[in-house]
Every structure is written in structure tokens, then in C-alpha cells.
Amino acid sequence: MLNETVILQHLNAAGFNKPIHIHVLESVDSTNRFLKDLPASNAIEVCCAETQTSGRGRFGRSWDSPFGQNIYCSIRWHFDCDLSQLSGLSLVVSMAILSILQPIDNDIRIKWPNDLLWHGKKLCGCLIESMGCSDVVIGIGLNVNAKNLHWGSLHEITGQHFDRNTLISQLLIQLDKHLKQFIMQGLTSFISTWQQVDYLYGQWVVVSQPAGHLSGRAMGIDALGQLRLTDEAGVMHYLASGDTSLKV
Ligand code: BTN
């Protein structure tokens, strides 16, 4: 079971000393929605739930949230800068998550902008919502102990059962570390890491955007975290958002 005290003990043991409130709920519509409606505070606010009744994904999709198996966790983070300076944030969040999963399996990759895949199966997705006032809600759905053939999960990869309280504390520690580096040194300090974990690099991909589809060969990211895509005519496109899939 998720347990706030256990998560805090892990954080203390690792020397994490920022003010933090952890809300562990049995059921909630969406952990992102919960934090967006929570009154302002000076602490990092975290909401984790055993299940979500209306878990939300990117592009208005829903996020399957079976009870007691996976991690549904949102973190409200305050940045001392304008949100317009945070382009590339979602990539940095996915690299923070990957840093705790790589020791479990080295074949996990990131599909731009922030899906974590294992052999093409989705393990983890992030929904990042800005609150306007330099606060951002980072929602993480990580498939941990679920045994479901459509997704990947850590259990499917290893056959083991994982303690979600430990993983959540590791996530918070790595998120703190990665966001600090992002603020101090910018996205460029992550580019070489990105190149090692980029699932799409060199592949023909289709990017769906509200305006339509674009296909081309993925050529990594630029300094703003935009996807570089060369189309059939050799023209380079720089995409700030979109849903990506391999072209079949
Ligand atoms: C995606 O890949 O589409 C993003 C999925 C994000 C799901 C997480 S689960 C915790 C948080 N609460 C939500 O309602 N969504 C995010």
C-alpha cells in the first residue's frame, strides 16, 4: 500500500530537506486535478493515489488506473522564473524518471517528448500542466506491478514485484536533482543523455498535431527540446509539440 510516512522516511534517509507535503489518497478523479485545486503553499505538493477514476493523459486521452498496482503521482513544483523559460521541461522530467528505471532495465528509451517505452511498449507517461503563476503540475503514470498485455510494466520486464513507496521517493529525489540542473545549466546540459536514450532517432515517424500529420525522419532535438524532423523533400521541421509514432 502507498504510505506517506514511509515515503517521507525514504526522503529523509536520502537527505532530502525541502518542505514537502505528500497527500496519499485511496481514490481520486485525477491526481493532477487534485493538486491544481489545492490552495497555494510554500511546499512541494505531491499527490499519489491507489486509483484514479478519471486519470487523464495527453491530448484528452484517459489514463487507465487499476487499483493498487501502479504509480499515479503528481507533483506541484514552483519555479522562480517565467514559464516561457521552461521549454524542454517535459524532456527533463522523462530523463529524471528514466534515471531510476535504467538500473532495472537498460533497454528503456524515451519517445519524444516524454513517453518511456520498453521494446516499444509504453511503461510511463507524463502530463505536465502549467498553472500560470510559475507553478507546474507534473503528473506521472508509471506501470509498476500491473500484469496487462497491452502495456509494459516493471513487473513484465523483470517478473518482480516493486515497492511503490520506494520508487516514489526515488522519483522525487531524481526530479529535484534534474530540475536543479535544468534551472542552473539549461537543457543543453542534457543533450548528450538525450542522444543515448532517444527512441525515435533516425526512424521514420509520424507526428500528429491539431493542424494535421507530418512525417519524416527524426533527427534528435534542438536546444529548446523541439523535435527535429527531416521530411521527404529534405526540409527540416522543428516541432514543439505533438504525438509521435513510428511510421509503418
Ligand atoms: C500520457 O502519456 O498521455 C500522459 C499520462 C499521464 C498520467 C498521469 S497518472 C498521474 C497524473 N494524473 C492524471 O490524471 N494524469 C497523470
Image (cartoon, rainbow, N blue to C red):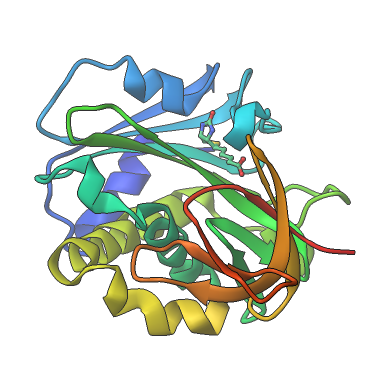
Instruction: Look at the image and tell me in which quarter the N terminus lies.
Output: top right
Q: Nearer the viewer, residue 231 or 42?
A: 231
Q: Nearer the viewer, residue 134 or 166?
A: 134
Q: Residue at x 66, y 41 (%)?
A: 69
In the rendered image, which quarter is residue 68 located in? top right
- Left or right side of 215 for 28: left
Residue at 53% across, 84% down: 196
Image x and y of residue 59, in percent: 62, 33
Left or right, residue 29 beside residue 118: left
- Of residues 214 and 61, the one drawn nearer to the viewer in this rendering: 214
| x 15%, y 42%: residue | 82
Q: Quadrant of residue 83?
A: top left
Please indicate, yes or no, whether residue 109 appears anywhere in the rendered image: yes
Q: In the rendered view of the protein, which quadrant contains the C terminus? A: bottom right
Q: What residue appears at the point 46 percent right and 27 percent down from the top-left corner?
A: 31
Whole-percent x, y for residue 174 in the image = 33, 63
Q: Quadrant of ligand 1?
A: top right
Q: Position of residue 191 (x, y in %)?
A: 38, 78
